[in-house]
Image: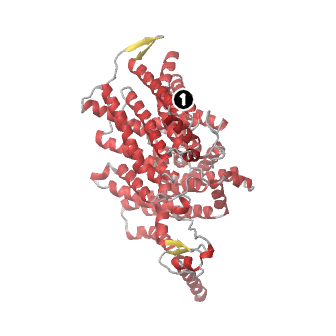
Amino acid sequence: MSTPLAFLARRAWVNLRTEVFVLPSRTIALVWAAALLLLPLLSDDAYLLRIVAMTCIFAVFAASWDLLAGYAGQVSFGHALFFGAGAYTAAVASLELGLSPWLGLVLAAAVASALGVGAGYLCLRLRGSYLSLATLAFPLITLGILFAFPEKSGGELGLSGLRSLFSSRVANYYLIAIVMLALVHGLWAIADSRFGLVLHAIRDDELAARASGINTPRYKLAAFAISACAAGIAGALYAHFMRGAGPSTLDVGLSFQAVIWGIFGGLATIYGPVVAVFVLYPLTEWLGSFTAFGEMRLLIFALIVLLVLLVMPRGFTPWIRDRIETTCPRCKGRVAAWRTICRVCNVPLHAPARAKAPSAGPVTNPGSPRASSRLQ
Amino acid sequence: MLQDILITGLVNGGVYALLAIGFSLIFGVARIVNVAHTAFYMLAAYCLYSLLSFAGMSMWLAALASVAAVTALSLICFRLFIEPVRQHESAVLIATIALGLIFQEVMLRSFGGHYLGIPNAVEGVVTFLGVSIPYQRLLILAIAATALAATWFVLHRTRLGLAIRATANDLEVANLMGMDVRRVAMATMAISVGLAAVAGVSVAPVFVVDPFMWLSPLVTVLAVVVLGGLGSLKGSLVGALVIGYVEAITVFLLPQGAFLKGAVALSIMVAVLLARPEGLYGVAFEEER
């Protein structure tokens, strides 16, 4: 009886040791996920749980923006549309239609995806800055309509009186944390699949992608739908967590927040924006808890972003990742920075590799500033 | 009613044109989507307010000084924060967002969030076709027309203008022909923010001055620029008038118009983009991938 269990445990341990602990970034990700799940056992502080739950919600939002903007290259300035649609749908489903909040969550995801397909359809022919600026318009148009019919939408005050999904604080926290981990992992898996590869191709050269037989409109619409779905779920969770949906969920500021998190964390990584939210959101909240800084929170936030960008223009997370990991020049595998030989192919990692094999051509590290600093 | 619409649309259209042409210029030359553009407009209004109430300058001198100060500030910001990350388009984008937020917060901390009033440069009204128009609005119109004419003159009749247009047309070839594209970008930034500052100074007495006054024109300016075509000056002018009139018509004719004016203007922009993805006068940069 105990043999298969012991076997499974040993295999899990071997996997963990050979696949996770060899790379610092994977170790960090594992520790982070474990810490999130263990946090309520260590501390029952309502404020702490609240901040972490909000961080989780915004992490989903930022990661969903990255799938659309970083991978597919559809740099949306109106991502709050999907967040707000999710929040308002959840609120309306619960308050007006009297549906179960779980059904409301599903409905919010569906409405947001539909809006994503709609917005994507309108934007199919637009490119670059035109697309950004046109998407900026969508949440504002929605906001104008909401304000024009205050008796249905609650106007400036929004809809309030929503119930939390669970009555217990810890259960709510677990729900949000687990949904976040699942959605972020899902987005990452999608981005890492063949689908994500096609999105990379569309971003880098849409014409070439089309010429290679890729149905680019279909892929772009799918990217819009998936990204909007995740953002809509985040919005619905937010509405239940804050017990209401207000115009701030459709704000330009929130759309720009997604852009800042995404670019600060590093585009086209999925984990980058999540890291950015987990660094920036608690940091600004913590700074805001000092009365001296309280009203300068946004100022400090903007200053940090500006100054960090001067040092790490490709984003915070890629910069850190390049410090703790390198790419093997021969097999292109990721290796911890302090190793001298590659963990996969045993080739020496540093200077000797180049000195011994001059005929191998220049070693180009795709992450090096030299390769990425070409003029656009 | 009709006269109201005509006059309001024209005055707002003029202000939007001032803002949009600057935005469009710097996008065309340096490919910078300068989100902080209207924040400079807000700064100019605050600068005018403080020069008037604390330094006790005369209106005209204060206005000139504000425009000069804000333009200088924009050049400093460009050198310090935008130039170092120019290679990374996305970094430039959030650098400008962050700059806008910083200006907003600094103004919020130093002046508070309440509305500030600035006296009109000229008092009195003129009655024209049965509508009474304050002189200040006529002055805005005159300033807008003069500034636009001056911009046109600089762009089409001077060597600097030639360099700006050449850089906007093709940055690499302009560079190969010996133009210092970096200095051209700086000059364009100065002209662009200068126009925004002129707009800020001239509308400050009419609109309310508060730290968030940059957000709503920002959206309108983006709509104008996209509607007219990014990088096209003629397009910006036409787009500004279209949006100015659409807003005026919405406000005067529709119930709840004040809430819907942004939505209607933006819907028109989206509609135009659907028919012509590069805007009314934009060039489709097919080769620019």
Residue A93 relative to residue A55: left or right: right
Which image quadrant for residue B125? top left
Q: Position of residue B149 (x, y in %)?
A: 49, 26
Q: Position of residue B40 (x, y in %)?
A: 40, 38
Chain to which the residue tagged by mark 1 belongs = B
Residue A12 relative to residue B184: left or right: right
Residue B172 in sight: yes
| Placement of A209 over or under B69, stated as above or below | below
Amino acid type, callout 1: Leu
Residue marked by disc 1:
B237
* Number of on-image labels: 1
> What colouring style does the render use?
secondary structure
Residue under the point 36% across and 42% down? B73
Residue under the point 31% across and 28% down? B61
Q: Nearer the viewer, residue A376 or B121?
A: A376
| Placement of A79 over or under B8, stated as above or below | below
Residue B85 relative to residue A190: left or right: left
Q: Nearer the viewer, residue A35 or B248?
A: B248
Residue under the point 67% across and 35% down? B275
> Which class describes the residues within 10 Å of circle 1: few (<14), some (14-19), or many (20+)?
many
Q: Position of residue A262 (x, y in %)?
A: 50, 55
Q: Nearer the viewer, residue B130 or B196?
A: B196
